[in-house]
Every structure is written in structure tokens, then in C-alpha cells.
Image (cartoon, rainbow, N blue to C red):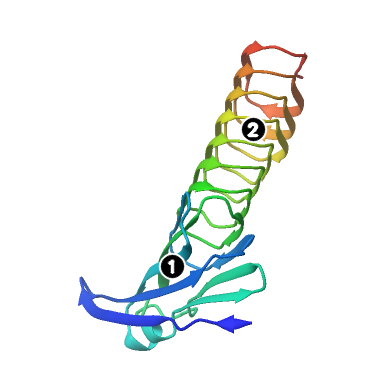
């Protein structure tokens, strides 16, 4: 496994917030998958057609030099897989406060992604097949997936559009907004929060829905809702079978 050097530069004090840059670059020639594991901080991933490298750029934030120095960005390649990870120390003191790393990744748009995001806002645009596990309270925005999309989502809202493949979502709470899906949608488990689905070429299946409105329109296949708690189910322009409780 090849470990890449990561730079730390530009440390400065701004509004009582110590910050420092973190960055790394790796060639993507022959890479099929990128595995991303992040801690506290927001995450932005942007795919680019024909892009030759993965470029990771981050800003570490902390309230002490000790915490700032312990925030890490690691990029490693093993065979046809690149691993990107951020780590930040846990701080239990009431004075020092948290340590976070805000991260931006630029990469080729045709590479598969496997992302585990602990907290913070997540924005992913123009990537290959995507698996995302998000456990934090920040929202998730996905636009442009060339392949299947699988999401295990925590309490934040989820928006996904322009997905060229099937969509699978297990959701804790928070609203779900899906649009322009070339494939089918399966949401077997959903907690509180509304679901809005529009412009799906295949079928839509929603399993156990605890609460919140369901709205579906322009569905090319079936619309099936197995069970729901409180909240209405509304639908328009469904070409296949409709089965709602």
C-alpha cells in the first residue's frame, strides 16, 4: 500500500478559530473505486469527465494548536482502490471545543464511490455508482450519478437527482426528495419526514413508513406503499399499478 505525503500549511487565527490546510493528490490511472471515510466537518465531492487525478483539499478547524495538529487527512492507494480518510480528535473539554476537517474532493466522474460520513453537510455531484452511509445530522445533496445509488441515511434531509440507475434508501428521519431517476426506487424503511418522488422511469416501492406525507408523480412503473403511519399518500401520472394503504 502506497501512503502519500499530506501537506499542512497556512495555519492562522481567524475569529478565535485556528485553521490549517490539508491536501493530497493521487493518480487515478487504473483506479476503479474510491473509498471515503470522514469524521466531523462538511464533505464535497465533484466529479469531472476525463480528470486524471484525485485531488483532496481540506481545512482543519480547532481552538487549540494541540487539537489542530491532531487533525489528519490520509490518502492511500492499494491496487485499483484509493482510500481517503479524515480523523479528528474527540475533545470533552467545555473550553477547547470541537475539531473538524472540511473536505473537498475532485475526481474522475466515472469511478465508483463508497462513502461513510460521520457528520456535517454532504454534497456529491457527477460521480459513478455511489454507496453512501451518512450518520450525522447534516443534509445530503446528490446530483448526477452514473449508475446505482445506495444510501443509508441518518436524521438529515436527503436530496438526489439525475441518477442513471436504481436507487435504494434506508432512512432514519428527515425528508427525502428524489427527481429524474432512470431506474426504480426502493425505500424499504423510512422514519419521520416527507417523501417526494418525481420523474422515475421504473417503479417506486416504499415499505414501512412511520410518519410524514408521501407524494409521487410521473412514475413509469408501479407505485407500492406497504404500510404507513400518520400522513397522506398523494400520486399523479403513475403508469403502472398503484397499491397504497
Q: How many marks?
A: 2
**Residue 231, x across and y down, in percent:** 62, 24
Q: Tell me if residue 99 can be seen.
A: no
State the image quarter where residue 112 is shown: bottom right
Residue 88 against residue 51 in the figure, above or below: below
How packed is label 1: few (under 14 Cα within 10 Å), some, or many (20 or more)? many
Q: Kindly identify the residue that appears in the image at 63 percent across and 30 percent down.
A: 182
Q: Position of residue 38 (x, y in %)?
A: 53, 67
Which element type, helix, strand or loop, lies under badge 2? strand
In this view, the residue in front, 92 or 26, is 26
Asked if the residues shown at circle 2 and circle 1 are in contact, with their CB atoms under 8 angstroms apart, the answer is: no
In the displayed structure, 111 sits above or below 25; it is above
**Which label lies toward us, 2 or 1?**
1
User: Considering the image in quadrants, where does the N terminus appear?
Assistant: bottom right
- 238 sits left or right of 47 in the view: right
Residue linked to disc 2: 211
Looking at the rendered image, the quarter that the C terminus falls into is top right
Labels 2 and 1: the sequence-earlier one? 1
- Give residue 229's position: percent from left, percent from top: 70, 29
Task: Examine the rendered structure and indicate whether residue 30 appears above or below residue 46.
Answer: below
- Give x and y (percent) for residue 155: 56, 49
Q: Quadrant of residue 175?
A: top right
Give the SS element for disc 1.
strand
10 Å neighbourhood of mark 2: few (<14), some, or many (≥20)?
A: some
Name the one closer to the observer, 235 or 30. Answer: 30
Residue where numbered disc 1 is placed: 56
Residue drawn at (50%, 81%) of the image = 4
The circle drawn on residue 192 is none
User: Which residue is located at x 52 percent, y 50 percent?
Assistant: 109
Amino acid at each position: 500500500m502506497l501512503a502519500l505525503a499530506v501537506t499542512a500549511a497556512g495555519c492562522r487565527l481567524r475569529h478565535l478559530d485556528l485553521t490549517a490546510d490539508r491536501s493530497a493528490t493521487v493518480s487515478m490511472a487504473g483506479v476503479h473505486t474510491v473509498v471515503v471515510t470522514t469524521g466531523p466537518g462538511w464533505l464535497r465531492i465533484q466529479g469531472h469527465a476525463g480528470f486524471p487525478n484525485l485531488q483532496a483539499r481540506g481545512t482543519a478547524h480547532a481552538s487549540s494548536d494541540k487539537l489542530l495538529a491532531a487533525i489528519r487527512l490520509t490518502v492511500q492507494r492499494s491496487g485499483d482502490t484509493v482510500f481517503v480518510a479524515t480523523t479528528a480528535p474527540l475533545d470533552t473539554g467545555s473550553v477547547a471545543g470541537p475539531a473538524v476537517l472540511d473536505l473537498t474532493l475532485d475526481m474522475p466522474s466515472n469511478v465508483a464511490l463508497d462513502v461513510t460520513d460521520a457528520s456535517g453537510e454532504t454534497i456529491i455531484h457527477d460521480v459513478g455508482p455511489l454507496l453512501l452511509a451518512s450518520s450525522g445530522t447534516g443534509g445530503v445533496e446528490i446530483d448526477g450519478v452514473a449508475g446505482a445509488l445506495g444510501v443509508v441515511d441518518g436524521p438529515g434531509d436527503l436530496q438526489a437527482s439525475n441518477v442513471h440507475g436504481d436507487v435504494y434508501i434506508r432512512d432514519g428521519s428527515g425528508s427525502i426528495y428524489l427527481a429524474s431517476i432512470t431506474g426504480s426506487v426502493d425505500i424499504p424503511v423510512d422514519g419521520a419526514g416527507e417523501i417526494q418522488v418525481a420523474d422515475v422511469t421504473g417503479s417506486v416501492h416504499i415499505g414501512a413508513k412511520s410518519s410524514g406525507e408521501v407524494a409521487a408523480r410521473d412514475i413509469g412503473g408501479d407505485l407500492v406503499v406497504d404500510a404507513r403511519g400518520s400522513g397522506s399518500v398523494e400520486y399523479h401520472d403513475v403508469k403502472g399499478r398503484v397499491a397504497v394503504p
